[in-house]
Image: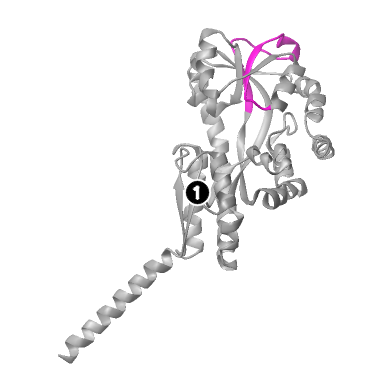
Amino acid sequence: MIMKNLKSVIAAVIAAQAIAGAAAAQDVTLRLGHLANEQNIWNKAAEKFAEEVSALSEGRIAVEIYPNDTLGSEIDLINGMQLGTADMTITGESLQNWAPMAALLALPYAYTSLEQMDEVASGPIGQEIEQQVIDKAGVRPLAYFARGPRQLSANRAITTPDELNGLKLRVPNVPLFLNVWQALGAQPTPMAFSEVFTSLQNGTIEAQENPLSLVQSANFNEVQSTINMTNHVRSWIYLAISELTWEGLSAEDQEAVTQAAKRAQEYERGLFLENEEAIRADLEEKGVNFVEVDEAAFAEKARDAVVNGVSEELRPTVEQIFAMQN
């Protein structure tokens, strides 16, 4: 009888420990929503982040990932993070609605290489951008991911600005982008992304500009024969957490989240480099012709439009970024 009671006590203790362990494993749950699909490298980097957070926090922190805007749009999530109803997202220049310096994340012809972009993003200017995002948007950048450069697709080779010659070109509704393409000699037209394929097909527009990943996923290769490698916008995007959520974490858990984000950034960079090569190879196999252009000529003609297209507050920093190209 004593032995039976002892076994019951031991079983109860083990059960209690298991319940306590399960509770500890769910001390914090971070919900991370973003716009990309499951196959996108941002989602894969988010999954890597979740794995690393769990390991570094010894299971205290769980990250739940919601791709495809299932928790809401990018702006919805930022608003939610400010209110404390959302925890994390992947976001970029949309943050300029609150923090003007976030416009520097996607500045035409400002970054001539991935290395120079890294120098800005990880250096004093990047730190200033991040601090303004924290202070004015209530969102804390934890890591940044590179984005594929925007390229110009058309049905002909365009190697210099002079060859644009009034090209009817779709651009997103970003005033700076419109100003730059007008200065280069094109005829830019703002249009929703969902309308681009049909508009290219029926000739309403002749060209569009986007990273190769979007050219591939939208099947623009079916209506565009040539990709002109203008590399006109190199940019980055942040893996970010609500400042309210961040302040609710212990110092130990903040450190775990920070280190996990660094590891996710390194992981994403490897995927990014592999992905760019694979996408180009796939598009070439589908018959798309890639054309190298005179980037210096495009950049030189665009520069004044870029500098004059930003606020007076940002112009000194923009000039500083351009100076780093030399």
Residue 95 appears at what percent x and percent y? 65, 41
Give the camera-side residue of 88 and 78: 78
Image quadrant in which the C terminus is located: top right
Horizontal and vertical percent position of residue 12: 27, 79
**Could one spot residue 144 in this view of the protein?**
yes
- Where residue 250 appears, as percent x and y from the top left, is 57, 67
Q: Which residue occupies 74% across, 15% down?
A: 161
226, 62: nearer the viewer: 62
Dot 1 alpha-carbon crowd within 10 angstroms: few under 14, some 14 to 19, many 20 or more:
many
Q: Residue at x 54, y 42 (%)?
A: 76
The quadrant in which the N terminus is found is bottom left
Give the extent of the magenta segment.
150-174
Please report the residue visible at 61 percent of the width from the left and 49 percent of the height from the top.
143
The reply, left or right, for residue 182 in relation to residue 214 is right
Magenta stretch holds residue 169 = yes
Q: Amino acid at mark 1?
A: Leu
- Image quadrant assignment for residue 107: top right
Residue assigned mark 1: 32
Relative to 17, 314 lies left or right: right
